[in-house]
Image (tube, coloured by chain):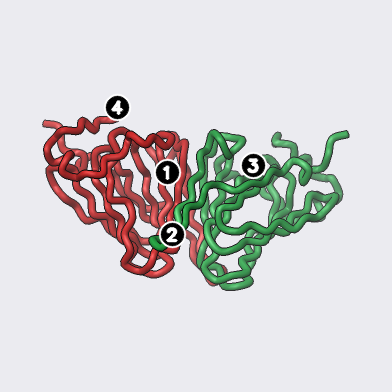
Chain colours: A green, B red
Amino acid sequence: MAGTALDKITRGKVSLFKDARGALGVVDFSKEIPFTPVRMFWIHDVPTGGQRGAHAHKACTQFIICGQGQIEIDAFDGTRREEIKLSAGEYVNLVPGIFATLTFPQEHSTVTVLCDRPYEADDYIYDAEMLARGSIVADGRK
Amino acid sequence: MAGTALDKITRGKVSLFKDARGALGVVDFSKEIPFTPVRMFWIHDVPTGGQRGAHAHKACTQFIICGQGQIEIDAFDGTRREEIKLSAGEYVNLVPGIFATLTFPQEHSTVTVLCDRPYEADDYIYDAEMLARGSIVADGRK
């Protein structure tokens, strides 16, 4: 039986080299990202405890990496909920159909997100209940 | 007459949305990056005034974006030197053959670099004088 969207996420950690000179993280797209990224965004300067996101995507897959500090993702796929904690260098590949809210629990935390699709305003789902009701088909097609 | 490598760099600024909830920067690869990125790295937690880089590439092009804070790039192509200052959201597309040293003048400054080639140990030039002597052909071929 096919699982729900949360059964399809994958997690991992990229190479992160830390020393007295600072930290350097590396993402090799063909090894770590299960798609060809066409867009990237990053979020920083979020007040401690602040939240971002609070939407799902109908078709866009998002490869979410914590750049520094920590990120907590509350993920809900209409059937079940999962709490995903990422430290610097850790990532989650979030398939479509997952309502995600990101919390920035520490000052100076950052997140970088690589996407498989360009920005499309009608790809966003702002009402988590639409996923619960199954009124959105979030399977990569639009 | 063909210019030097520094004549081929391009600069710009991506969309950066700032408000009380934090800052979000967006890079649309096909619009802003003149190649298809295959690798990304980011640098953070560099002590104030610290430096990174201090090498050139023979073939790799690097699209360098300042994520937050400020980055100063000392760039030397064997013929002339240029000082490039980037604030959050500003980028420079650094073609091969430019010896670049990045200084992080402010605490919590970050840089993200998108590359057109995988990591190749023999693509690095650690001696700026090799560029000055013209003993390296840095034209995108290896």
Answer above or below: position of B58 versus B105. above
Instruction: Give the mark toward the camera: 4 or 2.
Output: 2
Label 4, label 2: how many angstroms apart (C-alpha)? 31 Å
The single residue placed furthest to the front in the displayed view is A19
Tell me the subunit letter for badge 1.
B
The residue wearing badge 3 is A60
The residue wearing badge 4 is B142
Residues tagged by mark 1 and mark 2 found on one chain of the structure: no
Q: Say what secondary structure mark 3 lies in.
A: loop
Residues tagged by mark 1 and mark 4 found on one chain of the structure: yes
- Tell me the kind of residue under disc 1: Leu
How crowded is the residue under tag 3: few (<14 C-alpha within 10 Å), some, or many (20+)? many
- B117 left or right of A99? left
Label 3, label 4: how many angstroms apart (C-alpha)? 37 Å
For the residue pair B33 and B76, the one nearer the viewer reads as B76
Residues tagged by mark 3 and mark 1 found on one chain of the structure: no
- Tell me the kind of residue under disc 2: Asp
The residue wearing badge 2 is A19
Label 2, label 3: how many angstroms apart (C-alpha)? 36 Å
- B71 left or right of B7? right
**Residue found 55% across the figure and 64% down from its top:** A109
Tell me the subunit letter for badge 4.
B
Answer above or below: position of A77 versus B142. below
Circles 1 and 2: CB atoms closer than 8 Å: no
Expressed as whole percent of the image width and height from the top left, the position of residue A105 reads: 63, 69
Label 3, label 1: how many angstroms apart (C-alpha)? 21 Å
The residue wearing badge 1 is B114
